[in-house]
Amino acid sequence: MRGFVALVSLFFSAVAAPGHADNRPVSLPVQPTSLTLEPRLSKGQEVTGTWQGYASVGRKRVNYIWQISQQGQNVFGTISISTLEGLDKSTHAFEGTIQDSVLVFRATRWLSPQLSTWCMAAGTLKLDETTAPPELKGTWGANPIPGGCPTGSHGRVQLSRR
């Protein structure tokens, strides 16, 4: 036990703060600090670029081309939608977030004329980086804005990075 006490005394004397000439310890001021934690993207959650694929509308598929920009977890850009023949094309802006490989989006406004019965969707896509090229897959649905897709509308989305 004596060896233990001596060892503990030796340890604390080695880590003690510098003292006065008479060996009294000096107390050092404590500076308050603050720590802000911001969510970080997991490695590989960068989705900036062009994504191309389709959205299903009932049994039909329509072309979907997304131009995505990303700042941290925030994503924004354009979605162009057209028939498979490339006719009847419209484009709208969107915004959203990506966290834990899940991209949540909602269209915000038309950028080109709405020539058909297209609507602006909201939805959720999952980033899959195990495929080459990476894919975004998920669903679209209602969006409660003027020109948004009505309640009850929904479908699937599949996009590949270009």
Image (cartoon, grey):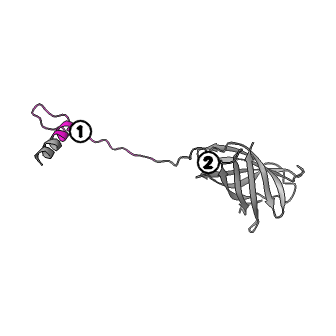
Q: Which percent across, then down, holds residue 150?
A: 76, 65
Point out the residue furthest to the bottom here: 152
- Camera-nearest residue between 89 and 162: 162
Q: How much space separates mark 1 and mark 2, taking CA atoms?
A: 43 Å
Instruction: Write down the residue under mark 1.
Output: 28
Residue 24 location (% of width, % of height): 12, 37
Q: Position of residue 88 (x, y in %)?
A: 88, 52
Q: Is residue 31 magenta?
A: yes
Residue 65 in view in this figure: no
104 sits left or right of 37 in the view: right
The 10 Å Cα crowd at callout 2, few under 14, some 14 to 19, many 20 or more, is some
Mark 2 belongs to which amino acid?
Asn
Q: Secondary structure at mark 2?
A: strand
Report helix, strand or loop for mark 1.
loop
Which residue lies at the image location 19% right of the left edge and 40% below the top edge?
A: 11
The magenta segment: 10-36
Q: Amino acid at mark 1?
A: Leu
